Image (spheres, coloured by chain):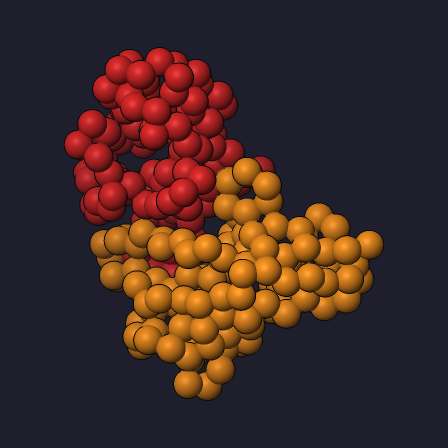
Amino acid sequence: DAKTTQPTSMDCAEGRAANLPCNHSTISGNEYVYWYRQIHSQGPQYIIHGLKNNETNEMASLIITEDRKSSTLILPHATLRDTAVYYCIATYYAGGTSYGKLTFGQGTILTVHP
Amino acid sequence: DSGVTQTPKHLITATGQRVTLRCSPRSGDLSVYWYQQSLDQGLQFLIQYYNGEERAKGNILERFSAQQFPDLHSELNLSSLELGDSALYFCASSRGTGHQETQYFGPGTRLLVL
């Protein structure tokens, strides 16, 4: 799995967009970028993933640069409940074999303020 | 609610003892993953099972073992417990199709070794 680098912490005002960056300069062509978050000591929660195109779902948007060396997770209207540790992970799943451990780094502690 | 269940939620035991953690994957998921989260090591992948067979191993100690049963539930056995084994243990599951897999995590088992 490619190594990812994230800022240790970020702050965001409630109602504003939270933009969380991630560098993955050694990502290979078949590695997806996944984002998970962990609220307090709960189980990590899947947010979104992508390969090279920008992705959006009901939780967030994922913007991947054209060279795929970095990405940004966007929470469009952050709420207090979005305060969590956000993990950016680059990983691949070999087709048909379902091999796919997730390598978690330290993540970004996002604090949403009232 | 991810659909992954783990029991027990909390476990307190003494050094040298053996415990079993149980995980039931989401309905239809064939792959089960075990992760350990300690304060000093962060979230670490331990082992993966796919449809009853071991698929990948991570930083799993020899004192630890796991298996996945025909009904697809999995158990993680921890023996000769040491103080340093105190951690959160998460189970995750995924479809097992091997393409764009998303892992869904359970709420975890908090193990305290005294």
Looking at the image, which residue sits at the far right?
A: A114
Q: Quadrant of the N terminus of chain A?
A: bottom left
- Vertical position of residue B100 compared to residue A24: above or below: above
In terms of depth relative to the viewer, which is nearer, A112 or B73? A112
Picture quadrant where residue B11 is located: top left
Looking at the image, which residue sits at the far bottom?
A: A66
Q: Residue at x 59, y 67 (%)?
A: A20
Q: Residue at x 25, y 61 (%)?
A: A94
Q: Is residue B110 left or right of residue A3?
A: right
Q: Residue at x 46, y 86 (%)?
A: A66
- Asked whether the viewer can see residue B92, the reply is no
Q: Residue at x 55, y 71 (%)?
A: A21
Q: Quadrant of the C terminus of chain A?
A: bottom right
- Give the image location of residue A33, x and y in percent: 43, 67
In terms of depth relative to the viewer, which is nearer, B71 or B44? B44
**Colour assignment, chain A:** orange
- Give the image location of residue B77, x and y in percent: 27, 24
Picture quadrant where residue B23 is located: top left
**Colour assignment, chain B:** red
- Vertical position of residue B66 compared to residue A50: above or below: above
- Give the image location of residue A70, x and y in percent: 46, 77
Picture quadrant where residue A112 is located: bottom right
- Give the image location of residue A42, x and y in percent: 55, 38
Q: Is residue A50 left or right of residue B52?
A: right
- Vertical position of residue A18 compared to residue B76: above or below: below
Q: Is residue B15 left or right of residue A10?
A: left
Report how many numbered discs are placed on residues in the image.
Answer: 0
- Asked whether the viewer can see residue A40, the reply is yes
